[in-house]
Amino acid sequence: MNFKRNILITGGAGFIGSHVVRLFVNKYPHYRIINLDKLTYAGNLANLRDVEGAPNYEFVRGDVCDYERMGELMRTYGIDGIIHLAAESHVDRSIEEPFAFAKTNVMGTLSLLQAAKLHWESLPERYDGKLFYHISTDEVYGALEMGEGLFTEQTPYAPHSPYSASKASSDHFVRAFHDTYGVPTIVTNCSNNYGPYQFPEKLIPLFINNIRTGKPLPVYGRGENVRDWLYVEDHARAIDLVFHNGRVGDTYNIGGFNEWRNIDLIKVMIKTVDRLLGNPEGHSDHLITYVADRLGHDLRYAIDSTKIKEELGWEPSLQFEEGIEKTIHWYLDNQEWMDNVTSGDYARYYERMYAGR
Ligand code: NAD
Ligand code: TYD
């Protein structure tokens, strides 16, 4: 089959990547979608069961740090578009293992950039019709005080955690490749995502599962930190829009204008899970357990997504109340998925991490 485009999506077996792969495979049958993923603890092909047989989908297991292999992949598939999501993504892990974050997020992004640059420069049309689209986070902007305003595209970078420092560094490399060599790049910085297929080390799936199984809910510090939550399918829609209509060399912030204090969000989750399980109101309130705060815990993230709204017409489609209810339903209905990802290594990791808390 002759495909109109050959698009490489890295990290497509992870949480956000699987939603992006699903959207592109279904919406663009005339594009070939190549999902390149190392399948770390966070990558799970079960996230893509519904599209794995599609004629325009291929999975390749590989590491973005493997520079030679990335070049070979670009040539073999004639890659003309890259959506780069592969990363180590969890702040708590970055505090424990910072080297892994520098390796994948910084060196991996650089390896992919250089492979794309050399491949595209070897073609007669060079960069025409090509795009390297890098998916990043609002955490690169650092932390806001309560009532301080929102992160805009002009906010200076001030990362605090090893995770956000590694993402900030990768964003700088992407822009440097645009400014130095003319590689066509775009960067988007998104707020916290939630929805189906998120690995249960992150707040929302971890807590839904703990409420269901009657386990303690480890609230860091006093639960007063604020995050701006966006439903993952709305992020995937934004990625689709930016990939097709975004301005090369530019940056867009993506967020839901939806700030929640952790403790308030946790109370909504407890109430909703209890209701859906038929428990009386207040049944699981006692599970709230205040634990030592995360080191360097950023107080508040909040995104101003006016630019993407005004320039590309993107807006979140789901109200938070609807999104969180849908998400909780999904985790309660997909126990097999949850049991699968919480077994083995992952459980041992958490035993170590929460020892003594
Ligand atoms: P995730 O941890 O769920 O998935 C990451 C995926 O990358 C996994 O499938 C993993 O196997 C793969 N991967 C890791 N190292 C790799 C390597 N060396 N080579 C190839 N594949 C590798 O992460 P996510 O939450 O889906 O985040 C995806 C991207 O979006 C990341 O770049 C992250 O920084 C960014 N982001 C995430 C959020 C969020 O709230 N989750 C918000 C904004 C931006
Ligand atoms: P997380 O889902 O790890 O995302 P991020 O740190 O990238 O924002 O955490 C969201 C918020 O929830 C953050 O303020 C830390 C807090 N949190 C807890 O209080 N307890 C937990 O067990 C986890 C995983 C997070």
Image (tube, rainbow, N blue to C red):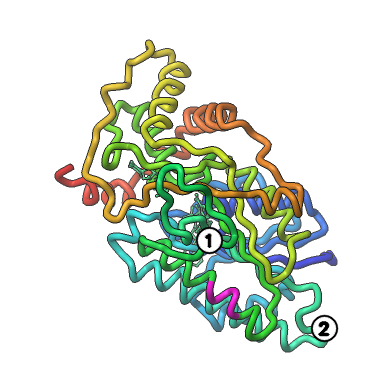
Report the amino acid beneath label 1: Thr
Is residue 12 in view from this perspective? no
- Residue for point 56% across, 42% down: 230
Which quadrant contains ligand 2? top left
Q: Which residue is mark 1?
A: 155
Closer to us: 317 or 313: 313
- Left or right for 207, reference 110: left
Tell me the SS state at disc 2: loop
Look at the image and tell me in which quarter the N terminus lies: bottom right
Residue marked by disc 2: 125
User: Looking at the rendered structure, which numbered label has been put on residue 306?
Assistant: none
Q: Is mark 2 within 8 Å of ligand 1?
A: no
Relative height, residue 182 to residue 268 (above, below): below
> Is the residue 127 above or below the residue 265 in the image?
below
Which amino acid type corresponds to the residue marked 2 in the rendered image?
Glu
On the image, the x and y values in percent for residue 54 come to: 72, 52
Q: Is residue 50 left or right of residue 281?
A: right
Quarter location, residue 215: top left
- Give yes or no for contact between labels 1 and 2 (Cβ–Cβ under 8 Å): no
Image coordinates for residue 151, horizontal then vertical, percent? 53, 53
